[in-house]
Image (cartoon, coloured by chain):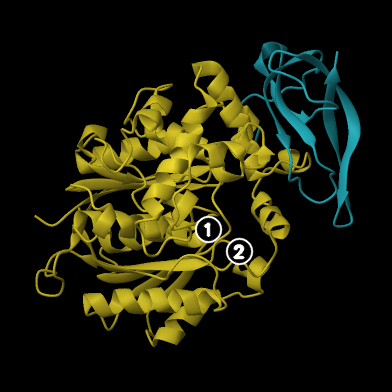
Chain colours: A yellow, B cyan
Amino acid sequence: MRDVAVLSYGLTPFGRHDASVVDLLASASQVALEESGTEAVDAVFVGNMSSGEFEGRSGIANALVSELGLEPAFPSKVENTSGSGGAAFLLGWAGIVSGLYDRVLVAGGERMSSVDTGRATEIIASLTHPVEHAQGITLPGYAGLMARAYLDRYGAPREALAAVAVKNHYNGARNPNAQFQEEVSMERVMDSPMIADPLRLFDFCPITDGAAAIVLSAAKGTERTAERPVHVRGVGGASDTQVVHEREDLTAMKAVRLAAERAYAMAGLGPEAMDVAEVHDMATILEIVQTEELGFFPRGEGWKAAQDGVTSLKGTKPVNTSGGLKAKGHPLGATGVAQIAEVCAQLQGRSGDRQVEARVGLACNVAGFGNDSIVTVLEGPA
Amino acid sequence: MHCRASSVEAVELGEGVVVTHTVLRVPPPGLTPPVPIAIVEFEGGVRALGQLTEPLETGARVVPEWATLREAGGKVYEGFRFRPR
């Protein structure tokens, strides 16, 4: 299989922007293109969920190509809900692996602040199965159902979930691109307003505007063009049922487990080899469950790792060094690309105050409520 | 259930048990908070997600009733909700 490298990455600050999603995508892409010294690419894949609903925009991949003067590169928007960025990455990577392309720009972005929180929640809830949608279920609602089942089954204290929020805010406070660069106390999390019992406001990621981009290349020859490319060692994607109540285990995320198994098998590396990981903590409970599904901890024990600091910057398995979706923010289509950018930054030693020691890492992007997942294993420069 | 499912059969929803639950404090249009919601398991392992007529704990026994669940965006959503047995 052809060796693929991430040459560079670029990010906008995450938070609130007046700029359109296309402008955000263009700023992130310009940084990535300039850093890689790339002037032309064969294709541009754009991860974005709902530019039409948020901003009344369609054709944003073509618009981005035009904005950047990248014609005649082939453009395509990839929509896979909150996994759009990961899906765009997977397709860009596959294009290079197949030999169809040599160099691809993968960008992800979303501008969500153009609507209020209620409308944003509704747009996101449109991804649910009609039978569940009719009931009024929201993504935070699913997270509440999973959290209740998890706490009951494993006898975990509510504070273990809050520990994830405290940790991710601590990390976000050390990330200049994060939406929330502020530490929070356990008390503040536990006293925040209830959203979907037992989960409170501080258990959830915010509404975010932002974009991220990476330049992918066939690795052969990149020694001349990039300082320190990061190698893509394994990529896996997998899906689960759209209907959440049909899943055999309500405290598990099968799509994450399967995607990880595929990525590990391709990389010839297992969970024990991962020095750092970005996971999809749309809610605190999801970080805990994903660290179990990724094989970092046995089922039912992820909460102990969160509580004991194992997943903190100083722990043996640092998770969401960027601040995660929780503190860095979650511009839907940007997230999967931004996660890969963070792992690259860690592997290249460019993470400043949040730097950990890492040679190999992974990114786990999730679509919907575990409806599907993309897991990517990356190895840093030698 | 899906179009290519190998075994599809109609089942009678009798009495079920709440296996997990939450309360939506920020529900979508057409609903007034708080909205208790649960996943209920019936005999034979069939499960359903639905609104509760009142907040209930895990293990509570419920029965389904057909109801108008909410009206939003010019649409009327109907389905099962669950009340204590």
Residue A71 - label: none
The label number, if any, that marks residue A50 in the structure image? 2
State the image coordinates of residue A67 (x, y, percent, origin top left): 45, 86
Does A238 sit left or right of B70 as displayed?
left
* Tag count: 2
Which element type, helix, strand or loop, lies under badge 2?
A: loop
- Vertical placement of B53 versus A15: above or below? above
Which of the two residues, A305 or A348, is positioned nearer the viewer here? Answer: A305
Nearer to me, A140 or A171: A171
Foreground tag (2 vs 1): 1
Can see residue A351? no
Q: Are marks 2 and 1 in contact (CB under 8 Å)?
A: yes
Quarter assignment of residue A9: bottom left
Lower position in the chain sequence, tag 2 or tag 1? 2
Q: Chain of mark 2?
A: A
In percent of width and height, residue A224 lies at 9, 74
Check the image and report above or below for A183 versus A210: above
Q: Is residue A42 above or below residue A234?
A: below
Q: Is residue B47 left or right of residue A321?
A: right
What numbered label is drawn on residue A332? Answer: 1
Where does residue A279 sit, x and y in percent of width and height? 40, 45
The residue type indicated by label 1 comes to Leu
Q: Position of residue B47 (x, y in %)?
A: 69, 23
- Circles 2 and 1 on the same subunit: yes
- Residue, x 22% and y 43% (percent of image)? A267
At x 27%, y 56%, the residue is A353
- Which part of the image, by quadrant, shows the C terminus of chain A? bottom left
Q: Residues within 10 Å of mark 1 (few under 14, many from 20)?
A: many
Picture residue at 37% right of the left edge, 75% below the top: A29
Amino acid, disc 2: Ser
Q: Is residue A93 above or below residue B62?
A: below
